[in-house]
């Protein structure tokens, strides 16, 4: 009985959370590409103008960033100016939630068939490394270790970005604690 | 609730053992196919391997309508288009690929064109593009290594653009894989060794990389046991049909394992080396396997240690303290490589191949970092890491 009443609220909250996390990540991707050399070096190998999308199937939340050249990303929000070149697609909102609430590593989600790549796999490999790097920026070390395969030794954090993002993280952690079955 | 999730899929009928080829006519008829085409290469034909296949079909009143025997080692978009042309002209209605990974991948790609239409195979590159089952397709492997008969992947070179096009779809899987010991008896020692090490690498990486799961584990360990039990016997006695069948089955099992759990850094480095230095795939696998396991060691200590049981048997396993089993597994693989070197000079280092320049290592490292399989390696690989592994594999 209780479950029946709570379930829809959980679904709604989960969608909202994924939505917000995509926005956080989109902005953070842009910000990190402006300050972090490692991310810039990874991104430089991508074609200029490449549109990258992360989305939830079938028509769920999405985030779109563009490689505007020289290793810089620009966040486009939810809509792309033209058809995207590389898309990472979660099969279900529940799977996006697992990854975006740092309960499952991005690489693990690939390994577990939670998501698909549409586009050049070598670009997807690069974007996964960028996302890993991003997660180590946003997350406190303890949680980041869960979210990425390896925690890098050489992090020089742009404090402003981190503190902003960590506010969301707090929301995330509370949320996970509340709804974890 | 368990935190573990996995998927496992293998719908390929396996027809294996004595007189397996003679089942082909029945299987074709079951799919209403009457005009099969054989796709193969010159080496396979020269080894006389088509004769038993053709004889098996003709005896059942089934005519092989066309034979294409010009598949090159790195099959290309134009070859695929040519074969599709012949298929249409001869009004064929099924494909039988007879050969190693090269002929099998080509057969898969041809099947896309003749089923979906058109002349441009590049159009179907990528994952999940195909939405319908393809024409009846059968695979008769003649090498025991790639496991392509049970993988949903094909790789074809686009000559004009100079890139390798990947095709991924479960519709690429054949209706049946026919594993007959007669088909690998003629495999020269060097190719026997290299392709067996490809299968060994598939099983080892399947068992130690990120997407390992209980079902793929079962196939991987069984494959390793068969390879370590039979490979050296077959090297000493190439006509050992029993041993040949063991290796062929191991290759299929390792293929089932890795297509459900993926591979890691050995394959990333191997794909890059193959592309830059044109070394055979199996040779690259044999080269890199121990060095990558050493690099991954602390992330895979436990599963790697378990493999000792399948490589060296229960006595050695139980006599080795648990804490040293992972290292002992790597030693066992090195020992096997030394034995293969003794028997057919299968190179153990990049230098021993005589085909790689030290100055190429950086390029190999960079290319490996873009390879899809690096995503499933248990350790996050940086450019520096890849360079370090390559330096150790150099000499
Ligand atoms: N689709 C997949 O899952 C997958 C996986 C791994 C590799 N591959 C592809 O497979 C190819 C390598 O395949 P391979 O290692 O099986 O080699 P191969 O098919 O290129 O054959 C190697 C050589 O051995 C000869 N040969 C084959 N069987 C013989 C026999 N029984 N007797 C005498 N000679 C024989 C062939 O004529 C050829 O010259 C690569 O192109 C690689 O890209 C595909
Ligand atoms: Fe392989």
Image (cartoon, grey):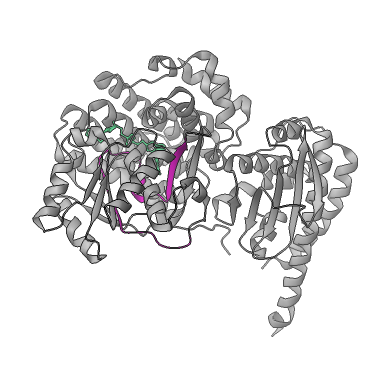
- Which quadrant of the figure contains the N terminus of chain B? bottom right
Across and down, in percent, residue B187 comes to 22, 32
Q: Quadrant of residue B183?
A: top left
Whether residue B195 appears in magenta in the rendering, the answer is no
Looking at the image, the residue that sits furthest to the front is: B89
Range of residues picked out in magenta: B131-158
Q: Is residue B128 left or right of residue B12?
A: right
Across and down, in percent, residue A73 comes to 79, 41
Residue drawn at point x = 36 percent, y = 43 percent: B82
Work out whether residue B102 can be spotted. yes
Q: Nearer the viewer, residue A20 or B123?
A: B123
Name above or below for residue B20 compared with residue B82: below
Q: Is residue A77 left or right of residue A152?
A: right
Residue drawn at point x = 83 percent, y = 48 percent: A27
Name above or below for residue A98 compared with residue B48: below
Looking at the image, the residue that sits furthest to the left is: B59
Whether residue B136 appears in magenta in the rendering, the answer is yes
Residue drawn at point x = 42 percent, y = 51 percent: B152
Q: Nearer the viewer, residue A64 or A22?
A: A64
Q: Nearer the viewer, residue B365 or B389?
A: B365
Labels in figure, total: 0
């Amino acid at each position: 009985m209780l479950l029946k009443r709570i379930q829809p609220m959980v679904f709604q909250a989960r969608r909202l959370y994924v939505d917000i996390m995509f926005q956080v990540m989109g902005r953070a991707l842009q910000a990190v590409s402006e300050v972090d050399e490692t991310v810039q070096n990874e991104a430089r190998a991508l074609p200029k103008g490449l549109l990258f999308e992360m989305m939830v199937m079938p028509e769920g939340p999405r985030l779109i960033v563009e490689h505007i050249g020289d290793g810089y990303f620009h966040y486009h929000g939810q809509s792309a100016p033209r058809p995207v070149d590389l898309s990472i697609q979660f099969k279900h909102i529940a799977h996006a939630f697992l990854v975006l609430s740092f309960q499952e590593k991005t690489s693990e989600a690939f390994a577990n068939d939670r998501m698909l790549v549409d586009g050049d796999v070598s670009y997807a490999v690069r974007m996964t490394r960028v996302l890993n790097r991003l997660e180590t920026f946003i997350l406190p070390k303890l949680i980041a270790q869960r979210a990425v395969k390896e925690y890098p030794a050489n992090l020089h954090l742009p404090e402003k970005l981190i503190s902003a993002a960590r506010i969301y993280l707090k929301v995330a952690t509370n949320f996970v604690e509340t709804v974890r079955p | 609730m368990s935190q573990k999730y996995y998927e496992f899929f293998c719908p390929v009928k396996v027809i294996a053992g004595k007189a397996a080829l003679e089942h082909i006519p029945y299987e074709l008829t079951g799919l209403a196919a009457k005009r099969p085409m054989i796709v193969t290469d010159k080496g396979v034909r020269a080894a006389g391997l088509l004769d038993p296949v053709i004889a098996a079909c003709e005896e059942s009143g089934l005519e092989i309508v066309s034979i294409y025997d010009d598949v090159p080692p790195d099959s290309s978009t134009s070859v695929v288009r040519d074969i599709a042309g012949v298929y249409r002209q001869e009004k064929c209605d099924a494909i039988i690929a007879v050969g190693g990974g090269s002929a099998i991948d080509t057969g898969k790609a041809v099947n896309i064109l003749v089923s979906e239409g058109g002349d441009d195979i590049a159009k179907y590159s990528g994952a999940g593009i195909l939405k319908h089952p393809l024409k009846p397709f059968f695979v008769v492997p003649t090498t025991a290594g790639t496991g392509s008969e049970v993988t949903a992947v094909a790789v074809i070179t686009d000559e004009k653009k100079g890139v390798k096009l990947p095709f991924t779809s479960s519709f690429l899987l054949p209706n049946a894989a026919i594993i007959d010991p007669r088909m690998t008896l003629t495999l020269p020692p060097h190719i026997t060794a290299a392709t067996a090490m490809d299968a060994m690498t598939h099983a080892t990486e399947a068992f130690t990389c990120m997407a390992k799961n209980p079902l793929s584990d079962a196939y991987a360990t069984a494959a390793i046991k068969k390879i370590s039990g039979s490979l050296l016997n077959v090297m000493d006695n190439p006509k050992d049909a029993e041993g040949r069948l063991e290796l062929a089955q191991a290759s299929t099992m390792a293929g089932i394992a890795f297509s459900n759990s993926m591979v890691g850094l050995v394959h990333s480095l191997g794909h890059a080396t193959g592309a830059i230095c044109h070394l055979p795939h199996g040779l690259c696998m044999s080269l890199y396997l121990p060095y990558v396991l050493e690099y991954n060691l602390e992330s895979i200590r436990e599963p790697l240690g378990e493999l000792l049981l399948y490589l060296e048997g229960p006595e050695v396993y139980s006599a080795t303290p648990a804490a040293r089993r992972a290292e002992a597994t790597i030693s066992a693989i090195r020992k096997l490589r030394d034995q293969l070197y003794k028997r057919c000079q299968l190179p153990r280092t990049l230098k021993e191949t005589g085909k790689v320049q030290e100055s190429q290592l950086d390029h190999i490292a960079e290319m490996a970092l873009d390879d899809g399989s690096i995503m499933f390696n248990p350790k996050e690989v940086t450019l520096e890491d890849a360079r370090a592994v390559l330096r150790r594999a150099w000499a």
